[in-house]
Image (cartoon, rainbow, N blue to C red):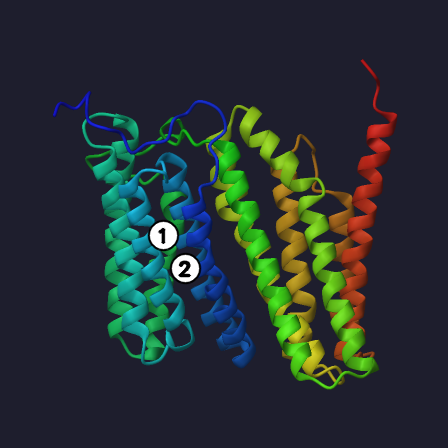
């Protein structure tokens, strides 16, 4: 069979690329992964635990977003692509199962599976691009293979190391993974990639990231519901439960009421889809998802321990909303033609900073602090919604 007659595994670039059911099926694994991360952080709520869980979260997010980039180019309706996705699902399930003991007895399992998934998916992409179908992207994935093969050595080496030095090995691996796109995957002899090589279909990537936010928010609601079901139902726990739900609704509102649609419009019609895909969706969305994960931990803390808040609890209860608002503010800033981040979000961050400073001196309980952070979310959501509606009302008619 000649190159011209060989069936392609690539998506058609005509019209909007739909998110396939196999991609949504793949995402189910990451419901489990996010739950594992939340539970791991809750069980090790200290500086060391936060650092280790944060590193694992960076790895999980990177694995998911790289797969989303690949399926932006590949057609998930083609059987080989679908089988590749299912193979990644199996790897993702093994990876997620190893998360609680990644810095313990299952370090090698985590490191080896992560490396195999990153390198294996890249090799599949090279196979799909063979025959000159997209020479620029083929060279791009050759460079990516070099970078990921280097980080794979550190993932596996860290898995073989003792728990203490393992953190250093894996910090190096994460640094390589995250610096790759910033350095355009520069490789001696192969040069560097260009944004023109990253011809993403913006609507698809925007939808994929929005769905991951839904996954993270859904995991938060699952944890809240499961925790509440085990507790005695009294005024305190019912109040904490309602606050957690209201906070989740406000978080959904802040991202999806206008931010998601405006971001999609920019990446589709702004003429800089590759830059937006790299900055707004690959890097900045990890702050948003990370904020949701920490907020889930905070909700469980408020439900189970509504009275005195320890310093670590204060950090989670205030830090989760701050991380989420910061991510949303930066995302909306870079996907809109505004000089500054949204004023509502910046005001919310200022209020959260004030809460963090006042919590210990005022001896605020976890429940009171949770109520205050939820109020901040509601204020930010209402403020932005009112400002946008008012802006549409006064906009000149053409």
Left or right of 305? Residue 175 is left
Depth-wise, is mark 2 or mark 1 nearer the camera?
A: 2
Instruction: Specify the quadrant of the image occupied by residue 270.
Output: top right
Front residue (pair 73, 28): 28
Question: Horizontal and vertical percent for residue 17?
Answer: 46, 32
Instruction: Specify the quadrant of the image occupied by residue 68.
Output: top left
Question: Horizontal and vertical percent for residue 117?
Answer: 29, 55
Instruction: Give me the residue at 41% from left, 30% from top.
Output: 195
**Label 1 environment density (alpha carbons within 10 Å; few <14, some 14–19, many ≥20):** many
With respect to residue 63, does 196 lie above or below?
Answer: above
**Label 2 environment density (alpha carbons within 10 Å; few <14, some 14–19, many ≥20):** some
With respect to residue 136, does 295 lie above or below?
Answer: below
Q: Quadrant of the N terminus?
A: top left
Q: Quadrant of the C terminus?
A: top right
The residue where tag 1 is placed is 177
Front residue (pair 388, 90): 90
* Helix, strand or loop for disc 2: helix
């Amino acid at each position: 069979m000649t190159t011209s007659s060989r069936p392609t595994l690539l998506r058609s670039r005509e019209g909007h690329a739909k998110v396939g059911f196999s991609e949504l099926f793949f995402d189910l694994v990451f419901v489990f992964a996010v739950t594992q991360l939340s539970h791991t952080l809750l069980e090790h709520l200290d500086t060391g635990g936060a650092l280790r869980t944060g590193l694992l979260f960076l790895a999980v997010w990177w694995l998911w977003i790289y797969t989303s980039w690949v399926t932006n180019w590949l057609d998930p309706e083609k059987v080989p692509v679908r089988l590749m996705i299912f193979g990644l699902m199996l790897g993702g399930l093994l990876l997620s199962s190893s998360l609680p003991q990644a810095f313990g007895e299952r370090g090698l399992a985590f490191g080896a599976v992560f490396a195999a998934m990153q390198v294996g998916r890249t090799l599949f992409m090279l196979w799909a691009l063979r025959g000159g179908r997209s020479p620029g992207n083929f060279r791009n994935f050759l460079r990516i293979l070099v970078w990921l093969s280097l980080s794979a050595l550190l993932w596996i080496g860290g898995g073989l190391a003792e728990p203490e030095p393992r953190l250093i090995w894996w910090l190096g691996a994460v640094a390589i993974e995250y610096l790759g796109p910033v350095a355009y995957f520069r490789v001696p002899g192969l040069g560097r990639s260009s944004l023109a090589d990253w011809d993403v279909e913006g609507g698809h990537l925007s939808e994929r990231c929005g769905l991951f936010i839904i996954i993270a928010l859904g995991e938060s609601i699952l944890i809240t519901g499961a925790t509440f079901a085990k507790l005695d139902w009294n005024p305190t726990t019912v109040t904490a439960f309602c606050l957690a739900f209201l906070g989740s609704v406000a978080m959904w509102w802040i991202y999806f009421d206008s931010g998601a649609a405006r971001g999609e419009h920019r990446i589709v019609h702004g003429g800089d889809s590759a830059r937006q895909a790299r900055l707004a969706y690959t890097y900045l969305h990890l702050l948003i998802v990370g904020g949701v994960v920490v907020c889930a931990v905070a909700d469980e803390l408020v439900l189970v321990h509504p009275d005195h808040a320890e310093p670590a609890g204060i950090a989670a209860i205030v830090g989760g909303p701050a991380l989420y608002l910061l991510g949303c503010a930066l995302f909306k800033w870079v996907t809109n033609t505004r000089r500054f981040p949204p004023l509502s979000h910046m005001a919310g961050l200022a209020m959260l900073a004030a809460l963090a400073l006042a919590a210990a001196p005022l001896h605020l309980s976890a429940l009171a602090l949770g109520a205050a952070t939820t109020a901040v979310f509601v204020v930010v959501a209402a403020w932005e919604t009112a400002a946008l509606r008012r802006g549409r009302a006064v906009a000149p008619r053409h």
